Structures are given as structure tokens and as C-alpha cells.
Image (spheres, rainbow, N blue to C red):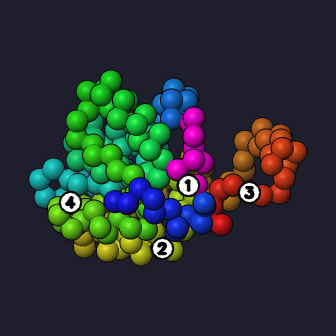
Amino acid sequence: MNQDVHSSTGYTNADGIFASCGAPYVTYRRPHPSAVVDYIASQFGHAPAQPRILDLGCGPGTLALDLAERGACVTAVDMSEEMLAAGRGWAKARGIRSVTWCQADATEVEALTQDTGLFDGATVADAFHWMDRPRVLEALGRAVRPGGFVAVVGYRAPGTQREWWHPLLEQLRLRWLGTVNLAGPR
């Protein structure tokens, strides 16, 4: 994929948004509950042989590596080369070799199917809010085989109350960044 294609996010430097975040994500990012990962892995039973899973907005592989440990061959896609590099290191440390790391725009994942065919499933974990959601879902509709699955995973259900510290974080954001919300397409 072309590393310079960042248009669908609307950010002029989509790769730079997460600069210096790779190592801290590996160290401090909360893992997904085993029940969530196990549920997604239970969907592998509908795939022939070793399931091919696409993980969009993968960061350093927080979900991709867990899915690979459960038997999937994962293509991990992110806009940030730094996050992908952190993921490669984390995979090596965990002894995981069934993940392919790819810097690409999430709306262009159909190109990843040209040589290997459609994916058996796709995941987007804690990253969907950064994406051009309608375009990503359209692309996934063309990249995932009929009968496959798309799992959008978030750390909290929409409409549920935010953590007690969220208003404090919001005050800091307003003070230092103004009213511009950095998440989501611009």
C-alpha cells in the first residue's frame, strides 16, 4: 500500500498523530477482556482452514496478537509506522509469527485481497472513531468474504457513562488544545 495515502482520515499527517505512542501503548494500553477475544475467535469456526483476519487501526497489535495466539493469520493495518514497528517488536517478544504488518489507509483494504483473496473476518478495536466510518464499512464489505464477520470493539458501550476522570481530561483538552476534538475524520 502507498505509505503517503492519508486522505480518507482527513488529517494532513495521519501517521504523526500517534508519534511517540508505540511503546507506551504496548506497556500501558488496557488489553481487551479475554471474553471479547474468545468471542471473536469463536467466529473462526466458520472459516476454512486457518482463518485470515484483518485488523484495522491495529496500533501495536493489542487485539491482532491475541487473535494470532488463538490461531488466526492476521493482517494488521495502521496508518502509523511507529505503531506497526512497536507491534512487530511485541510480536517478536511474544513469539508470534502469523501477523503481517501493513501501513495503509483503512478505506483501501480491498487492495490487500488482490493476491490472497477475501478475509474471513475483520476487527476494528478502539479505533473506529478515528476513521471515515461509512467508507471503511464499504471497504470491509468488499474485503470480507460472504458469511465472514466484522467486529467493532470499544472499551465502553455507546451511551454508557464515562469514567469519573473524563470531565477532568476534557478540561485539560479545552485548556491546551481548544475546542478542536482530535478524534474522528476532519
Disc ID at residue 181: 3
Q: Residue at the far top: name it.
A: 93
Q: Residue at x 26, y 32 (%)?
A: 96
For mark 2, what is the residue? 135
Mark sitting earlier along the chain (3/2): 2
In the rendered view, does 137 fall on the left or right side of 95?
right
For mark 4, what is the residue? 46
Answer whether residue 14 is magenta in the image: yes
Disc ID at residue 3: none
Q: Are marks 3 and 2 in contact (CB under 8 Å)?
A: no
Instruction: Tell me which amino acid carries mark 1.
Output: Ala
Mark sitting earlier along the chain (1/3): 1
Which of discs 4 and 2 lies nearer the camera? The answer is: 2
Q: Is residue 14 above or below residue 66?
A: below
Instruction: Tell me which amino acid carries mark 2.
Output: Arg
Nearer to me, 69 or 158: 69
What is the magenta range?
13-21
Mark sitting earlier along the chain (4/2): 4
Q: Is residue 97 above or below residue 141?
A: above
CA neighbours of label 1 inside 10 A, class few (<14), some (14 to 19), many (20+): many
In the rendered view, does 10 fall on the left or right side of 125?
right
Answer whether residue 137 is magenta in the image: no
